[in-house]
Amino acid sequence: MLVLTAAFLGGELVFSIGTGVNHHAWQEVPTKFTRVMLEGQLTDNMLVKAMAGDTPILLYKRGDAICAISETCSHAGGPLSEGELDGNLVQCPWHASRFDVCTGQVKGGPATISQVRYETRIQNGQIEVRRSEDTLQPN
């Protein structure tokens, strides 16, 4: 009976809630540069959520550098744009996973999967993003 209960609970956690599932695995990501925001709307040292089609992107600007990673936490799907910023690390508001906002690398768990990283550029006053070729995430 204990084994059946554990199996049911495990299945419920994984398939209904997505516990322990990479929340980026089935997410469409732009492979071509896509406009996400006017350059003037992004302020230094602020986390901003933008959309590349249906994909939420987290933007961060420091000086002339603009960084972009997936806005949805890989651990449990939390909104990183609502997290706390400490230097170049963002902490997920749901379970305190920490990620480098420029590389997407996990810097503190419980997350074990890095965030998808995006290349950025400015074209005609628009910030554009596309999936980085060196990102660690499959898709």
Image: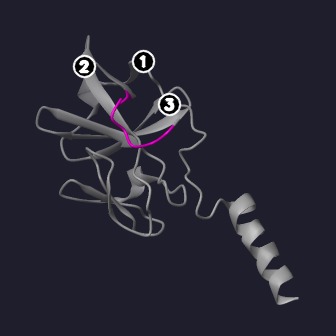
- What amino acid type should be assigned to the residue bearing mark 2? Ile
Using the numbered discs, state the Cα–Cα distance from disc 3 to disc 2 in whole angstroms.
19 Å
- Disc 3 + disc 1, Cβ < 8 Å: no
Residue holding disc 2? 122
Label 3: few (<14), some (14–19) or many (≥20) C-alpha neighbours in 10 Å? many
Q: Which element carries disc 2, helix, strand or loop?
A: strand
Q: Which element carries disc 3, helix, strand or loop?
A: loop
Point 56% across, 50% down: residue: 23
Tell me the chief SS of the magenta region. loop
- What amino acid type should be assigned to the residue bearing mark 1? Lys
Q: How many marks?
A: 3
Label 2: few (<14), some (14–19) or many (≥20) C-alpha neighbours in 10 Å? some
Looking at the picture, tell me which residue is in the foreground, 28 or 43: 28
Residue holding disc 1? 32
Using the numbered discs, state the Cα–Cα distance from disc 3 to disc 1 in whole angstroms.
9 Å
Relative height, residue 53 to residue 63 (above, below)? above
Where residue 120 appears, x then y in whole percent? 28, 27
Q: Which numbered disc, 3 or 2, marks the residue that appears first in the sequence?
A: 3
Residue holding disc 3? 29
